């Protein structure tokens, strides 16, 4: 986004903003600064530490008005506040680029799984190593476990949802936090069944459809994007989601490459313009620290949740499973954190956000934000039989 905008806007320095994490396992500030220096942008970065995540989590959930499964919206909430303090009211965001140009690793994963039975052993090992290079479990030392794991997912298990089956299993685990037991996949299966062209799409195209209609629209553009921006009066604009950009991308995706180099056409378009380090950088998703900050800075609160009846008083939550999850995360974090899985992290953040939603919108605590007048008691005037 920066490189495109900088080449168009030449009359004055382009202003750019980013977050920098004190946790270096998540930080990408060196690459951001490299691009900023290349195009001489006026760059500002906001440094985020673990305490910031905890301190701003409640307000973030309030503005999201939805359960969260990651803490990634928290730095966006903080960054929008910083941007607004500079007098800026609208920004350009790169949201949509990965969905439009097949940038996410899930597209490579889907392609590999769909070709699993016809791919030889050595090639499987090579491609698996490229899938999620930022995750320790995807190292060559763990290739036998990875082979066994993906062997189990070589065939479709959930009709219509092949590409996202592994991801959706995390959702199945998190659903155990709720007292009411429903099929977590029923809604999305009914949705894809109604689409007249979905069944005829390739596995990669189905993955793209699901990304557009679930994570992008329901989370990235909403909970993590617009709602965090508008919390401080910032409008997010997303050029990659322009209909003409989408049409162009759909006409060239997978025509000039094998699908295992993410955003291949964008890389080739800027080859020779951007440094090789940026052009050939493996896809690293934007991430923020999840459960760790809570154990580090809110351990007394977590212990209170486990030892009191606070969770029992929340109608939606299964307190037995919730307390077991908290204890598991706390124990494993204090032991070094190596055994905490993505599934555990997401379920933990989901639980923390449910607690905050109950506080804000059920118990109506936090008067600094919420008008005490309940929505269902507001006077509504009918005009021409419309409300």
Image: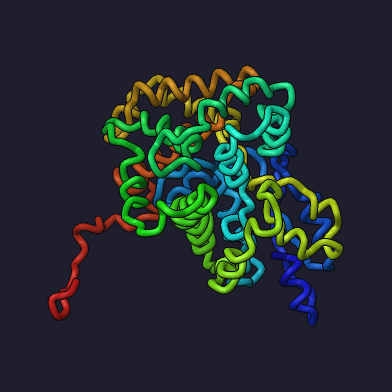
- Picture coordinates of residue 206, whole percent (x, y): 48, 51
Farthest residue toward the front? 118
**Residue at 83% from the left image edge and 67% from the top image edge:** 39
Q: Quadrant of the C terminus?
A: bottom left
Q: How many marks?
A: 0
**Residue at 68% from the left image edge and 46% from the top image edge:** 260
In the image: residue 164, left or right of residue 83: left
- Picture coordinates of residue 156, whole percent (x, y): 45, 36
Residue 6 in view in this figure: yes
Colour logic: rainbow
- Picture coordinates of residue 108, whole percent (x, y): 62, 44
Which image quadrant is residue 311 in? top left
Q: Quadrant of the N terminus?
A: bottom right
Frontmost residue, 199 versus 145: 199
- Picture coordinates of residue 313, whole percent (x, y): 29, 31
Residue 223 in view in this figure: no
Farthest residue toward the left? 385
Frontmost residue, 320 versus 151: 151
**Residue at 77% from the left image edge and 48% from the top image edge:** 281
**Residue at 74% from the left image edge and 39% from the top image edge:** 24
Which image quadrant is residue 276 in? bottom right
Which image quadrant is residue 336 in? top right
- Check the image and report above or below for 357 versus 148: below
């Amino acid at each position: 986004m920066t490189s495109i905008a900088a080449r168009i806007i030449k009359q004055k320095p382009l202003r750019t903003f980013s977050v920098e994490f004190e946790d270096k396992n998540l930080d990408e500030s060196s690459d951001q600064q490299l691009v900023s220096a290349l195009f001489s942008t006026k760059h500002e970065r906001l440094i985020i530490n673990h305490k910031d995540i905890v301190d701003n989590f409640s307000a973030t959930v309030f503005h999201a008005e939805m359960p969260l499964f990651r803490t990634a919206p928290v730095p966006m909430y903080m960054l929008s506040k910083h941007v607004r303090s500079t007098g800026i009211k609208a920004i350009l965001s790169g949201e949509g680029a990965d969905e439009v140009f097949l940038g996410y690793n899930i597209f490579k994963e889907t392609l590999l799984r769909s070709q699993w039975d016809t791919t030889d052993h050595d090639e499987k090992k090579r491609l698996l190593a490229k899938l999620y290079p930022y995750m320790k479990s995807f190292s060559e030392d763990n290739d036998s476990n990875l082979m066994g794991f993906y062997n189990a997912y070589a065939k479709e298990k959930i009709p219509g949802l092949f590409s996202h089956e592994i991801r959706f299993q995390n959702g199945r685990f998190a659903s155990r936090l709720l007292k009411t037991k429903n099929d977590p996949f029923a809604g999305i299966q009914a949705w894809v069944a109604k689409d007249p062209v979905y069944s005829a799409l390739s596995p990669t195209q189905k993955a793209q459809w699901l990304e557009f209609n679930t994570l992008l629209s329901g989370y990235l553009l909403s909970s993590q994007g617009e709602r965090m921006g508008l919390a401080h009066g910032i409008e997010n604009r997303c050029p990659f989601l322009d209909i003409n950009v989408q049409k162009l991308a759909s006409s060239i995706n997978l025509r000039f490459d094998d699908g295992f180099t993410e955003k291949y056409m964008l890389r080739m378009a800027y080859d020779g313009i951007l440094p090789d380090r940026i052009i050939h950088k493996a896809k690293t998703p934007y991430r923020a620290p999840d459960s760790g900050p809570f154990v580090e800075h809110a351990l007394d609160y977590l212990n209170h949740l486990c030892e009191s009846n606070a969770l029992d008083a929340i109608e939606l939550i299964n307190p037995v499973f919730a307390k077991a999850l908290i204890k598991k995360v706390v124990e494993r974090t204090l032991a070094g954190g190596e055994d905490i899985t993505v599934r555990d992290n997401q379920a933990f953040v989901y639980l923390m956000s449910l607690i905050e939603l109950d506080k804000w919108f059920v118990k109506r605590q936090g008067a600094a934000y919420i008008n005490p007048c309940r929505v269902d008691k507001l006077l509504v005037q009918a005009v021409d039989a419309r409300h």
